[in-house]
Image: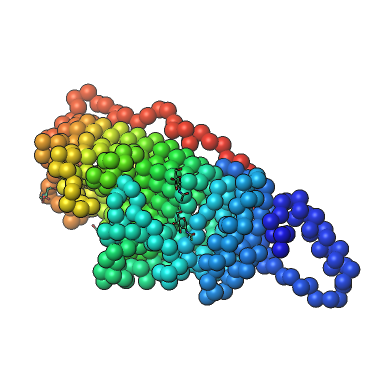
């Protein structure tokens, strides 16, 4: 039994040993048979691992019916000492692995092979109930606690969830139906992946489908990479956001493809008085080469929970198709905090309700204790070099009375309208800024600069963009 905790060297010795045994016992059936694990796949990662194990070593059965919750939980407990000694990789081989919620550990890679599907249990008792996030004060669905996410982690460092496009399937149908019929009155639905208070997190080369609610939720964490991830959920599924960086610093999201029932990416930092008190912003966030389809929501939403502040967000080389709006700022009186230093360029859009949308009256509150004097600051918002086709309304920009959104800059933006476009193309209130080479003609609150300008986009990089990944073997 100790053999499953093996280093690469042990693996070689063991293999050689097995071959000798097989020769010696030729003719006698082999006792232990292990599913093929396609060892030898090269992948890139923040860190490589000294030890490896396969989930079947812990009694898991990949038949799509047997619960493997115990196997996953035991695997993490038993592998933790190895993880502390040079890191460990847990391989999920081809098969359907039904499981409830489990926690990860540090210096750990969960490698989901091609053909492997992690199936999230629909049995609520397989999800521990955890307290609300301190920056939210309650669960997002209901006042009170939350079901733990399928894959969770707290206080970790150096965690990787990757594979060669294996799948994590949230089997959301059960949760969506119960949510829609008002069944979650005191506990909030689980997310697919939620990592709290952690550093150096990588999620790459996996497909996530049908989460009960949000798909990827890094919160209170630093140095996060989400790369090469496909996220798919029905366009009418409730709250199935793609990726939600929440009170995180130094995050890179790139080469992702998202189709969802809610925002493809929703940048957050806590809700009303709880978020103001917790005061942890999302900052240094770079999003690039995203493809998004979301007919009822945004490509990138900033808010509506932004009470800890959102600043220094860069969005580029992104394609949005059949999406309600490209970038949407959502806030309200009572939120406090700020959304500032936002930069976007080279967005290509097709079939959009709105290109630009800012909402200053997103009046969903945690409770009735929100502070009416807590006004959000929205300023220095820069959009440039964009084209959009088949657009119903170019812009709906609604600031807050006596708290206008300022420093808005838009340049080199060409919007062509849908056959059934609305008459009022720029609907602007309580905002201020400038435009340059934008068609159709913007509202009077965004006057055209006489001398053409290019809106700002930072020339420096955020630190995580310069990280060089290592070549590892699964
Ligand atoms: C993703 O997969 C590609 C090939 O399929 C591989 O070259 C690359 O190293 C992987 N990247 C990450 C970050 O896992
Ligand atoms: C995961 O960790 C959280 C926080 O420590 C805990 O509340 C939860 O019970 C753990 N989950 C499992 C399955 O052990
Ligand atoms: C995380 O770390 C904090 C601060 O050290 C500690 O209070 C908390 O109990 C830890 N939580 C878990 C689940 O490890
Ligand atoms: C990964 O799988 C998804 C779902 O099957 C597919 O849409 C996507 O193209 C695949 N990605 C890669 C890189 O093979
Ligand atoms: C244009 O947008 C409308 C919805 O506003 C949609 O029904 C139609 O299919 C789109 N046309 C093209 C050519 O994509
Ligand atoms: C204007 O934006 C388009 C992309 O929409 C880009 O190809 C072009 O180079 C930009 N023009 C200038 C002058 O920057
Ligand atoms: C303009 O925007 C305001 C506030 O967002 C909205 O109430 C109003 O209906 C819009 N007007 C039109 C003509 O779309």
Above or below residue 103? Residue 31 is: below
Q: Residue at x 38, y 54 (%)?
A: 242
Q: Residue at x 62, y 46 (%)?
A: 84
Where residue 331 appears, as percent x and y from the top left, is 22, 45
Above or below residue 378? Residue 298 is: below
Where residue 376 appears, as percent x and y from the top left, is 21, 38
Picture quadrant where residue 460 is located: top left
68 sits to left or right of 451 = right
Residue 152 visible from this viewpoint: yes
Where residue 34 appears, as percent x and y from the top left, is 70, 67
Picture quadrant where residue 438 is located: top left
332 sits to left or right of 216 = left
190 sits to left or right of 441 = right
Where residue 434 appears, as percent x and y from the top left, is 20, 31
Q: Nearer the viewer, residue 230 or 118?
A: 118
The quarter in which the N terminus is drawn is bottom right
Picture quadrant where residue 46 is located: top right
218 sits to left or right of 403 = right
Above or below residue 407? Residue 395 is: below
Q: Residue at x 44, y 33 (%)?
A: 462
Q: Nearer the viewer, residue 454 or 241?
A: 241
Q: Nearer the viewer, residue 145 or 284?
A: 145
């Amino acid at each position: 039994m100790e053999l499953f905790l093996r280093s690469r060297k042990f693996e070689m010795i063991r293999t050689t040993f097995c071959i000798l045994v097989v020769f010696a016992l030729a003719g006698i059936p082999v006792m232990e048979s292990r599913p093929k694990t396609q060892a030898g796949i090269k992948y890139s990662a923040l860190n490589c691992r000294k030890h490896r194990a396969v989930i079947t070593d812990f009694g898991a059965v990949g038949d799509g019916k047997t619960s493997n919750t115990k196997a996953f939980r035991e695997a993490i407990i038993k592998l933790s000492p190895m993880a502390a000694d040079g890191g460990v990789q847990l391989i999920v081989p081809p098969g359907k692995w039904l499981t409830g919620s489990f926690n990860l550990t540090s210096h750990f890679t969960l490698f989901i092979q091609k053909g492997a599907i992690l199936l999230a249990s629909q049995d609520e008792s397989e999800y521990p109930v955890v307290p609300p996030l301190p920056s939210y004060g309650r669960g997002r669905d209901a006042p009170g606690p939350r079901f733990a996410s399928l894959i969770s982690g707290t206080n970790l460092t150096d965690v990787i969830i990757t594979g060669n496009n294996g799948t994590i399937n949230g089997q959301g149908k059960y949760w969506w139906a119960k949510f829609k019929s008002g069944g979650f009155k005191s506990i909030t639905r689980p997310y697919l992946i939620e990592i709290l208070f952690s550093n150096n997190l990588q999620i790459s080369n996996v497909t996530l489908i049908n989460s009960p609610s949000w798909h990827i939720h890094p919160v209170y964490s630093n140095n996060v990479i989400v790369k090469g991830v496909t996220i798919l959920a029905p366009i009418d599924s409730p709250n199935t956001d793609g990726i939600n960086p929440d009170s995180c610093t130094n995050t890179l999201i790139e080469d992702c493809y998202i189709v969802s029932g809610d925002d493809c990416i929703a940048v957050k930092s806590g809700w009303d008085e709880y978020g103001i008190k917790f005061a942890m912003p999302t900052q240094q966030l770079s999003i690039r080469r995203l493809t998004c389809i979301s007919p009822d929501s945004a490509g990138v939403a900033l808010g509506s929970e932004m009470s800890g502040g959102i600043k220094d967000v860069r969005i580029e080389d992104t394609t949005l198709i059949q999406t309600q709006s490209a970038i949407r700022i959502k806030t309200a009186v009572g939120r406090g905090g700020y959304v500032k230093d936002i930069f976007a360029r080279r967005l290509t859009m097709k079939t959009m309700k709105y290109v630009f949308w800012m909402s200053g009256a997103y009046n969903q509150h945690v409770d009735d204790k929100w502070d009416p004097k807590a006004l959000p600051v929205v300023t220095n918002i820069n959009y440039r070099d964009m084209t959009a086709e088949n657009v119903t309304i170019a812009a709906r920009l609604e600031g807050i009375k006596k708290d206008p959104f300022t420093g808005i800059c838009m340049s080199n933006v060409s919007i062509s309208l849908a056959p059934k476009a609305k008459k009022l193309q720029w609907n602007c209130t309580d905002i201020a800024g400038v435009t340059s080479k934008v068609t159709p003609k913007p509202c009077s609150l965004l006057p055209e600069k006489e001398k053409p300008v290019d809106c700002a986009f930072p020339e420096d990089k955020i630190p995580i963009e310069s990280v060089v990944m290592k070549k590892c073997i699964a």
